[in-house]
Image (cartoon, rainbow, N blue to C red):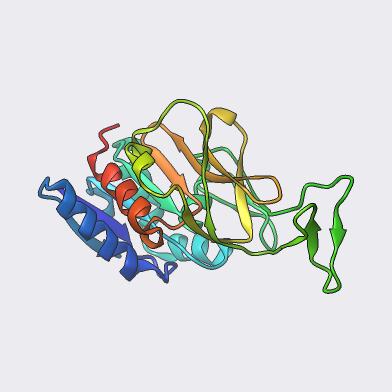
């Protein structure tokens, strides 16, 4: 059984994802092999598919499109064959219909919705510090973009197998992003993070899961989530 991490030239975190998934596969003990592949044929026949990504949406989407047969291979494995799929960071955002990062760009349209820039909740009491950063009373803490660092998750809807057993770990996971996916269907929203308002942290439907945070950088909680992914049989 093969766990494939798609190497399309758009993921600077490929090595850490491979290392974390290999560790998780050892914990699961189901004889899964974890490998990075750049060939469309290997993606099309995979048993689990992971799509990481860092950087700008348009660059990552172009890299997938320019990789011969990769878009078709992902569609074959994930949509036609229903293999478990995990998209992380930009890999999650690529699941959306469109992104508004530096223009309007088409995604896979697997999770209908838009990728939009993080924006503060407007209203009474919003102020700016001397540097022009938005400050959230009463703490006076600057509200930075990009949103980065460790934050708790707030879960929505029924419990999902991807997050089973996480209660005994720290709920904090690691984020680095300036945009987030706003799903058109609220039933696809799996988790949010509170950062000057609710931001999408995870989405899911059928055999698809996406996380805006980085499981491979989220220590114990991230490793448990990856192990859950490898146990998942949607």
Q: Residue at x 31, y 36 (%)?
A: 82
Q: Is residue 61 visible?
A: yes
- Placement of the C terminus among the 4 image quadrants: top left
Give the vertical position of 233 relative to 53 (above or below).
above
Q: Residue furthest front?
A: 138
Q: Residue furthest right?
A: 124
Q: How many marks?
A: 0
Q: Residue furthest bottom?
A: 131
Image spot of residue 101 (x, y percent): 66, 60
In the rendered structure, the answer to whether residue 218 lies left or right of residue 131 reads left
User: Relative to the observer, which residue lies in front, 132 or 79?
Assistant: 132
Picture quarter containing residue 26?
bottom left
In the rendered structure, the answer to whether residue 6 lies left or right of residue 171 reads left
User: Relative to the observer, which residue lies in front, 97 or 179?
Assistant: 179
Picture quarter containing residue 233?
top left
Q: Is residue 40 visible?
A: no
Give the vertical position of 19 relative to 202 (above or below).
below
């Amino acid at each position: 059984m093969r766990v494939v991490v798609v190497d399309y030239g758009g993921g600077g975190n490929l090595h850490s994802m491979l290392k974390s998934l290999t560790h998780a596969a050892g914990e699961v003990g189901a004889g899964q092999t974890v490998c990075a592949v750049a060939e469309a044929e290997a993606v099309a026949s995979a048993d689990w598919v992971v799509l990481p990504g860092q950087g700008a949406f348009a660059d990552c989407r172009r890299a997938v499109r320019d990789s011969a047969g990769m878009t078709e291979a992902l569609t074959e494995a994930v949509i036609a064959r229903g293999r478990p799929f995990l998209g992380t960071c930009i890999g999650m955002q690529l699941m959306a219909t469109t992104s508004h990062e530096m223009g309007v760009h088409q995604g896979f349209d697997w999770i209908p919705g838009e990728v939009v820039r993080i924006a503060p909740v407007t209203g009474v009491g919003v102020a700016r510090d001397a540097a022009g950063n938005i400050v959230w009373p009463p703490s006076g803490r600057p509200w930075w973009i990009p949103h980065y660092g460790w934050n708790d998750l707030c879960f929505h809807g029924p419990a999902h197998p991807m997050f089973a057993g996480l209660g005994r770990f720290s709920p904090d996971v690691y984020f680095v992003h300036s945009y987030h996916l706003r799903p058109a269907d609220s039933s696809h929203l799996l988790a949010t993070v509170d950062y000057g308002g609710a931001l999408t942290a995870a989405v899911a439907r059928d055999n698809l899961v996406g996380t805006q945070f980085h499981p491979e950088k989220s220590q114990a909680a991230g490793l448990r989530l990856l192990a859950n992914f490898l146990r998942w049989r949607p």
